[in-house]
Image (spheres, rainbow, N blue to C red):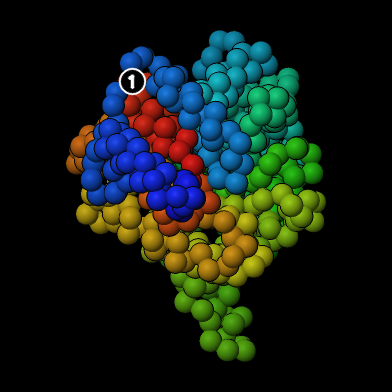
Amino acid sequence: MVIRLFNRHSMIVCVFLLAIVVAVTMAVNFNRSPNLKTSVAKSPRPNEACATSSAAESVAQVTGNESEMRAVWVPYLSLNMSRDDDKSEQAFLNKFNTIINNAKKCGMNTLIVQVRPFADALYKSSYFPWSHVVGGTQGVNPGYDPLADMVKASHQAGLKIQAWVNPLRIQVSNTPSILAVGNVYNTWKKDNAKADWVVDFGDGKYFNPAYGGVRRFVADGVKEIAQNYDVDGIQFDDYFYPTQDAAFDRTAYSAYCESAKKTGTPMNLSDWRQANVSAMVSLVYQEIKSVNPSLPFGIAPQGNVQNDLAMGANVTEWCSATGYVDYICPQLYVNFENPVLPFDTAAKAWRQLVTNKKVKLYYGLAVYKAGSDADSGTWKTSSGILASQVEYGRETTCDGFMFYSCDYLVGDQTKQEVQNVVEALGRSP
């Protein structure tokens, strides 16, 4: 976006102002090019990643720009009370308020909070047992409603909050260690008609979206959130089919093929899985809109489109057709030097993929990699990578950014990157 700084009232004034602009530009020496790794000057208060005076000014500038999404993901591990001695409501609120304060210092305007990580709930649900995250053991009532508290606290702080849901995961690597007696995995496994609705595969347990009853169950569970809580959006993450192995859903696919052959040619396994997931996504979208037509529903898929398709996530369809999502937020957890999928290449590809003008495009950025040894140490070559990604994202006219995760907004590893990206967010898009 080009901002016109002055009008040509007279040649003298024009030349004078131009000279000032050139001088300031040379002094600041900020390079917008994502391929040039130029660092912004370090903070005079290095122990406070988001609390420098310049960053504070940036936050003040971006607060009023509600059109740009500036969200941070809050994973269930950041809310985990299961290992804490004090599992009280106040202890939970203290933990969540710290997250709020850090997010506000860094100029965020939205929290994406994981409220259903393992077919369980951080809220009162008619479909899912209480999560071990708040009760210590799945199915144990913590004695308060965490989501209700988080919605209230977020709104009081001037932040929006979206409910982040994992639609198909039940248990992975023995987490949670115990499934509640009332968990549908246990009840469906005992029902011959529904035994294949859930699948044991590898070290995990998952819902099988091949069945209409499963898709309805997932959609009703999301609708419940929209009905009972004043959330500002609902988001699915990138976990759909956990494998490409045909053994995962062989029974269901065989039944489908047998039926489809009677009237035509069956879809191949990959296309069939994509159709199953898309049917689930569409149903979820419909149920959310039946409660509140203006409540956004979005998905945060992997940044690699081919990986998404392999997992059953037909992001091409979701980004072009109406009735699936209100926004898409690919997790572009790469930098400009990534040899497989450089950030600029991925960002351009997603910009071109979103052809439905009603679908907003956000970029998911990897704060957790900043200053780390990830990707052969390329995240240590500059302290302005995330800031450059913000600038590049704005050049591609994306609608905002989501940062993973809240825990990395503070800390020595990421403090310089975070300061620089806060300052970048403060510059008008």
User: Along the line of sight, which residue is nearer the eye, 109 or 191?
Assistant: 109
How many numbered dots are placed on residues in this image? Answer: 1
- Label 1, residues with CA under 10 Å away: few <14, some 14-19, many ≥20: some
User: Which residue is found at the position 59% from the left and 28% from the top?
Assistant: 132
User: Which residue is found at the position 46% from the left and 70% from the top?
Assistant: 270
Residue 208: x and y, percent? Answer: 57, 57
User: Which residue is found at the position 75% from the left and 45% from the top?
Assistant: 226
Query: On screen, 131 above or below 276?
Result: above
User: Which residue is found at the position 43% from the left and 57% from the top?
Assistant: 396
Q: Check disc 1 and report the residue beneath it.
A: 43
Residue 397: x and y, percent? Answer: 48, 56
Determine which quarter of the picture holds residue 144: top right
Residue 83: x and y, percent? Answer: 51, 17
User: Along the line of sight, which residue is nearer the eye, 213 or 91?
Assistant: 91
**Residue 19 seen in render:** yes
Residue 265: x and y, percent? Answer: 53, 86
Q: Is residue 131 left or right of residue 23?
A: right
User: Along the line of sight, which residue is nearer the eye, 401 or 228?
Assistant: 401
Q: Which amino acid type is shown beneath numbered disc 1?
A: Ser
Secondary structure under tag 1 reads: loop
Q: Is residue 231 left or right of residue 66?
A: right
Q: Is residue 294 left or right of residue 412?
A: right
**Residue 304 seen in render:** no
